[in-house]
């Protein structure tokens, strides 16, 4: 079974609430994924057949709600993709460029005790997988929906708290084949 068939047959759904048309080609709404209420963006390459259509077709909505449930179940795969692409090293590089804090009682300290991020939070190095996992939270998912399944891809937008990346978001792509790819930092 390929990835899209797996999603079509996925037994769960996550409701997309407050769906509104943004323009002829896109819609937006809200949903709860990974325990966070996030923005959902649904974009089409082509306008719908009915130019006056103001609601998302039911068959597309059901598919996307199953897709959200599938993504909800694959958080660890997203994290593993980032870990495999050395996100911890990148987070440490960014964190070490923040304001260092030295223990004023330790006059011989070569290394800072911790770093103070732009959001005011403390970061201790090294950053562990667990610390990074707990910091990563979902902010938005964008479904890019051309009418041909093999071209579809999804953008998963995440932020970190503490903000390791100084107001930059982490982007993860999910292609129609079902593989996650690190899209790098955006911001």
Image (tube, grey):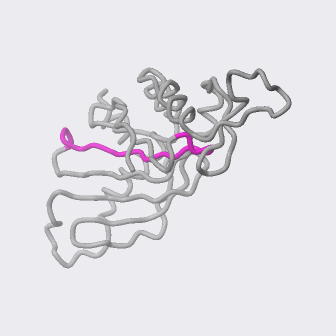
Image quarter of residue 112? top right
Spot the residue most to the bottom: 52
Above-or-below relation of 63 to 30: above
Spot the residue most to the right: 105
| Magenta span | 149-164
Name the residue at 24% across, 44% down. Answer: 152
Residue 10 horizontal/vertical position (percent) = 43, 39
Residue 94 horizontal/vertical position (percent) = 51, 35
19 relative position to 34: left or right:
left
64 relative position to 121: left or right:
left
Residue 171 horizontal/vertical position (percent) = 39, 42
Between 85 and 6, the one lying in front of the other is 85
Above-or-below relation of 79 to 50: above
Between 36 and 107, the one lying in front of the other is 107
Name the residue at 74% across, 33% down. Answer: 102
Between 175 and 91, the one lying in front of the other is 91
Residue 132 horizontal/vertical position (percent) = 59, 32
* Residue 180 among magenta residues: no
Name the residue at 34% across, 31% down. Answer: 181
Quarter of the image with the N terminus is top left
Name the residue at 38% across, 54% down. Answer: 62
* Residue 150 among magenta residues: yes
């Amino acid at each position: 079974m390929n990835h899209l068939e797996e999603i079509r047959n996925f037994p769960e759904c996550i409701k997309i609430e407050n769906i509104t048309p943004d323009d002829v080609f896109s819609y937006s709404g809200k949903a709860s994924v990974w325990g966070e209420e996030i923005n959902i963006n649904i974009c089409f390459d082509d306008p719908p057949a009915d130019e006056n259509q103001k609601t998302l077709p039911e068959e597309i909505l059901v598919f996307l709600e199953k897709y959200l449930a599938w993504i909800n179940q694959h958080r660890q795969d997203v994290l593993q993709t980032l870990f495999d692409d050395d996100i911890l090293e990148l987070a440490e590089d960014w964190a070490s460029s923040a304001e260092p804090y030295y223990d004023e009682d330790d006059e011989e300290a070569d290394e800072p005790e911790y770093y103070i991020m732009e959001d005011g939070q403390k970061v201790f190095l090294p950053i562990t997988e667990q610390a990074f996992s707990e910091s990563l939270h979902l902010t938005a998912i964008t479904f890019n929906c051309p009418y041909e399944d093999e071209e579809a891809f999804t953008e998963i937008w995440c932020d970190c708290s503490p903000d390791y990346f100084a107001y930059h978001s982490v982007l993860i792509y999910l292609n129609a084949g079902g593989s996650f790819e690190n899209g790098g930092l955006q911001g």
